[in-house]
Image: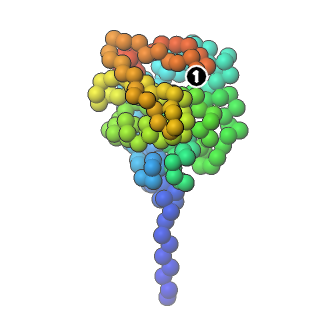
Amino acid sequence: MALLQHELTLSEAADLLSRALPGHRVEILQGRLTATPPPDGSHALSLSCLVVAFDRAGARKAGLRYVQGVGLWLPTLPDDYAIPDFSLVDEDFRDALVQKNCYAPNVFRLVAEVTSSNWSDDLGPKVECYAEAGIPVYLGADRKHDEVLLHRDPVNGKYPAPERYRRGQSVPIPESVGVTLELSADTLLDGD
């Protein structure tokens, strides 16, 4: 009896890992497979606060939608994709489906990540990937180092040095995303 072996592609391995780890967020960043465990309560509350803040700022009236856990197809390597915690996208983003429930980067106005146990991905590879994808604004709530990082306006696939916000400060969301608002650094870090 002959045994045929099939070497998995990275994309196939990601699909298998997603099925094997329900509730985990599986991504391919710069050719590396990652799996993030389900968020804790503060993480989830931070994302809920973002939804409320963007709603109050009139995002829907401005032709934008706010979504959680929607895939972003990345131009870094052929199989790369990320699943940001929160995204502000164009109203017609669903027309930009690429594959695997991931959408083209041009419909994303802002992505936000609230760090978890794999915080180094949010502060390293994701910054690079989002910049290379041309995402205008990347907001990182860095719970490990107790600060919020605002990356914006990538040039030649790189963000300039981030603006850093500590507790007690407000984080101004650039008008270029389509709405004007300020977010509390404390709320982004704690969800309260």
**Total residue callouts:** 1
Q: Nearer the viewer, residue 53 or 154?
A: 154
Res 103 quadrant in image: top right
Q: Position of residue 173 (x, y in %)?
A: 50, 18
Residue under the image location 66 percent in, 43 percent down:
97
Side of 97 where 80 appears, left or right: left
Res 161 quadrant in image: top left
Q: Secondary structure at mark 1?
A: helix
Q: Position of residue 165 (x, y in %)?
A: 36, 18
Residue under the image location 37 percent in, 33 percent down:
115
Q: Position of residue 138 (x, y in %)?
A: 48, 29
Residue that extends furthest to the front in the rendered view of this protein: 156
Residue under the image location 57 percent in, 44 percent down:
73
Q: Position of residue 155 (x, y in %)?
A: 51, 33
Q: How is the image coloured?
A: rainbow
The answer to whether residue 108 is visible is: yes
